[in-house]
Image: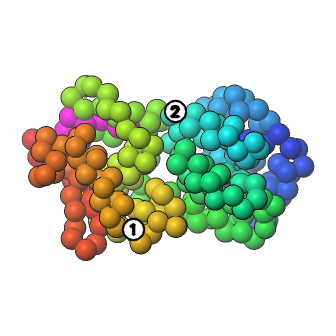
C-alpha cells in the first residue's frame, strides 16, 4: 500500500508515517510539502490513500476540491481543533473522513483502516471508466457523460453515483451509502440520501419518476442496474 501525505511539517509527516508503518509494515509513504506538488505526485505515484493537512483550513478545502475534480481516491484530512464548521467544509469539499489534531495514533490507524475497508471491501469495479447504455463515468477524471454530453454533478452526487456504479447490481444499504459518501454522522438520515438520489435521477434518467438505473429497494437501500437497450 502506498500513502501520500500532503503536509508542510516534516515532523508531522514522520509521525504519521511511523503510526501507519506499525499497522502496515510494508507500507510505502511519500510526501509533498506543497499542494501543487501533491497533485503531481498523485498522478505520478498512484497512491492508495491521500492524507491532507488542514493548515490553514480554507486552503485545505481548496486542495480537497482540486483533488476531487481530477482523482477518485480515498482522502483523509487532518482537522485542527474542535471546529465543526471546518470539519463540515472538508467533508463537503470531498474528503472521505477527517481526524482531529493533535491526533491519537490509535485513532489515526483505525480511521485509515476503516476508510480503506469502505473503499475496497465491497468488490469495487476499479476500472478507470464505467459505461452503461448512454452513461459513461470516468473514475480517474471524475467526469460523467450522458449521450456524449458532460453532466455536471456536485461532489456528493458524483460520490453517490460512483459508489452505486462500482457495485453494479448490489443493493447498498442506506446507512452504508451515507457513511461512505457523507460520513458516519449521516448514517440515519434516509431522507437526505433520497433527496440526492432524486437529483441524480433528474440529471440521468429519461423519466426521474420511473428510474431505470438508480433503483430503490424499499426499506433497504439502492442499487445500480444497467439499463435494458
Residue drawn at point x = 59 percent, y = 57 percent? 97
**Is residue 110 one of those drawn in magenta?**
no
Q: Which residue is identified by label 2? A: 70
The span picked out in magenta is 132-138
Q: Is residue 110 above or below residue 53?
A: below
> Residue at 82% of width from left, 48% of height from top?
13
Q: Earlier along the polypeptide chain: callout 1 or callout 2?
A: 2
Quarter of the picture containing the C terminus is top left
Disc 2 residue crowd, few under 14, some 14–19, many 20+, Cα 10 Å: some
Residue that sits furthest to the top in the current view: 148
Q: Quadrant of residue 132?
A: top left
Task: Give the structural element (helix, strand or loop) at label 1.
Answer: loop
For this view, does 131 lie left or right of residue 3? left
Residue 46 placed where, x, y %? 61, 39
Separation of disc 1 and disc 2 at Cα? 29 Å
Q: Mark 2 falls on what kind of element?
A: helix
Residue shown at 34%/67% (left/top)? 190
Image coordinates for residue 33, horizontal then vertical, percent: 80, 36
Task: Count up the numbered dots.
Answer: 2
* Marks 1, 2: nearer the viewer: 1
Q: Which residue was labeled with disc 1?
A: 189
In the figure, is residue 31 to the left or right of 39? right
| Mark 1 crowdedness (10 Å alpha carbons): few <14, some 14-19, many ≥20 | few
Q: Is residue 131 left or right of residue 111?
A: left
Amino acid at each position: 500500500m502506498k500513502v501520500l501525505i500532503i503536509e508542510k511539517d516534516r515532523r508531522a509527516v514522520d509521525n504519521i508515517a511511523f503510526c501507519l508503518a506499525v499497522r502496515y509494515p510494508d507500507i510505502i509513504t511519500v510526501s509533498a510539502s506543497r499542494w501543487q506538488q501533491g497533485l503531481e505526485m498523485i498522478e505520478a505515484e498512484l497512491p492508495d490513500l491521500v492524507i491532507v493537512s488542514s493548515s490553514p483550513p480554507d486552503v485545505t478545502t481548496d486542495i480537497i476540491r482540486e483533488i476531487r475534480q481530477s482523482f477518485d481516491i480515498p482522502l483523509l484530512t487532518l482537522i485542527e481543533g474542535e471546529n465543526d464548521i471546518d470539519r463540515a467544509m472538508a467533508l463537503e469539499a470531498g474528503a472521505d473522513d477527517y481526524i482531529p489534531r493533535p491526533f491519537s495514533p490509535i485513532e489515526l490507524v483505525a480511521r485509515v483502516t476503516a476508510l480503506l475497508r469502505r473503499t475496497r471491501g465491497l468488490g469495487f469495479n476499479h476500472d478507470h471508466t464505467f459505461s452503461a447504455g448512454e452513461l459513461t463515468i470516468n473514475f480517474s477524471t471524475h467526469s460523467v457523460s450522458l449521450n456524449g454530453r458532460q453532466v455536471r454533478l456536485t461532489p456528493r452526487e458524483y460520490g453517490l453515483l460512483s459508489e452505486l456504479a462500482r457495485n453494479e447490481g448490489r443493493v447498498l444499504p442506506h446507512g452504508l451509502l451515507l457513511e461512505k459518501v457523507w460520513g458516519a454522522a449521516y448514517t440515519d438520515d434516509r431522507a437526505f440520501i433520497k433527496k440526492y438520489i432524486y437529483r441524480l435521477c433528474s440529471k440521468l434518467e429519461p423519466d426521474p419518476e420511473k428510474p431505470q438505473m438508480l433503483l430503490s429497494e424499499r426499506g433497504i437501500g439502492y442499487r445500480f442496474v444497467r439499463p435494458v437497450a
